[in-house]
Amino acid sequence: MKNQIKERRKAKGISQQELANYCKVTRQTINAIENEKYDPSLQLAFDLARNLNTTVDTLFMPEQ
Amino acid sequence: MKNQIKERRKAKGISQQELANYCKVTRQTINAIENEKYDPSLQLAFDLARNLNTTVDTLFMPEQ
DNA sequence: TTTAAATGTAAAACTCTTTTGACATATCAA
DNA sequence: TTGATATGTCAAAAGAGTTTTACATTTAAA
């Protein structure tokens, strides 16, 4: 599943570490999700969307 | 996390088994999620939203 | 150029999700 | 009443996501 986390995070001018702190996960978790090693849990998806001022449905794009 | 799966499924007139078939998971998975034993994976959340003609953001309500 | 911050990556351990198989109850139609 | 469908639940195991720890490279600023 594709996502726009990296783009949105950079647009907001924050580091992976800062986003990780806001979402209460580690930096490595943010990095892995940005680089699509795996998808986040549903709860983390909502946390990411909230902290990036968007919605789950626009932040993530399931393949078809 | 709360969700509106049971209400939406009944409104559509389909059984847990039918929704499970559409989403390619077992009936027990649908049942457990409807009764909030656990949250679905992000991919399954999108599959559920699609098959219930709604969005992830409206189908699920993270607590606060 | 030097230094610190930022990012990438990987393995192991851990936790959560999903499946499998089973058994139970309730409802409704024949 | 009988049989089929729908739902609830549980335990064990398998599958998938997260955390931790550690080390590496890249980038940006001084």
Image: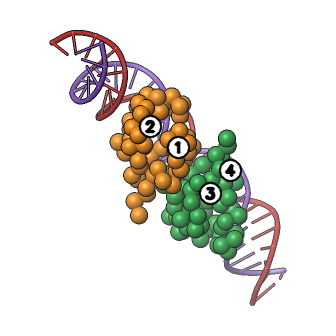
Chain colours: A orange, B green, C red, D purple
Q: Which quadrant would the C terminus of chain B be assigned to in this image?
A: top right
- Evaluate if marks 2 and 3 touch, with contact meaning CB atoms under 8 Å apart: no
Seen at 41% across and 64% down, the residue is: A64
- Evaluate if marks 1 and 4 touch, with contact meaning CB atoms under 8 Å apart: no
Q: Share a chain, discs 1 and 4? A: no
Using a 10 Å C-alpha cutoff, classify the residue at mark 2 as few (fewer than 14 neighbours), some (14 to 19) or many (20 or more). Answer: few
Of pointers 2 and 1, the one earlier in the residue sequence: 2
Which disc is residue B2 wearing? 4
Q: Which residue corresponds to mark 3?
A: B58
Report the amino acid beneath label 2.
Answer: Lys
Q: Share a chain, discs 3 and 1? A: no
Q: Give the distance between the C-alpha atoms of the residues marked 2 and 3, in whole angstroms.
A: 25 Å
Using a 10 Å C-alpha cutoff, classify the residue at mark 1 as few (fewer than 14 neighbours), some (14 to 19) or many (20 or more). Answer: few
Report the chain holding disc 4.
B
Q: Give the distance between the C-alpha atoms of the residues marked 4 and 2, in whole angstroms.
A: 29 Å
Which disc is residue B6 wearing? none
- Evaluate if marks 2 and 1 touch, with contact meaning CB atoms under 8 Å apart: yes
Report the amino acid beneath label 4.
Answer: Lys
Residue D1 location, quadrant: bottom right
Q: Share a chain, discs 3 and 4? A: yes
Report the chain holding disc 2.
A
Seen at 67% across and 74% down, the residue is: B13
Q: Secondary structure at mark 2?
A: helix
Q: Secondary structure at mark 3?
A: helix
Which disc is residue A12 wearing? 2
Using a 10 Å C-alpha cutoff, classify the residue at mark 3 as few (fewer than 14 neighbours), some (14 to 19) or many (20 or more). Answer: few
Q: Give the distance between the C-alpha atoms of the residues marked 1 and 4, in whole angstroms.
A: 21 Å
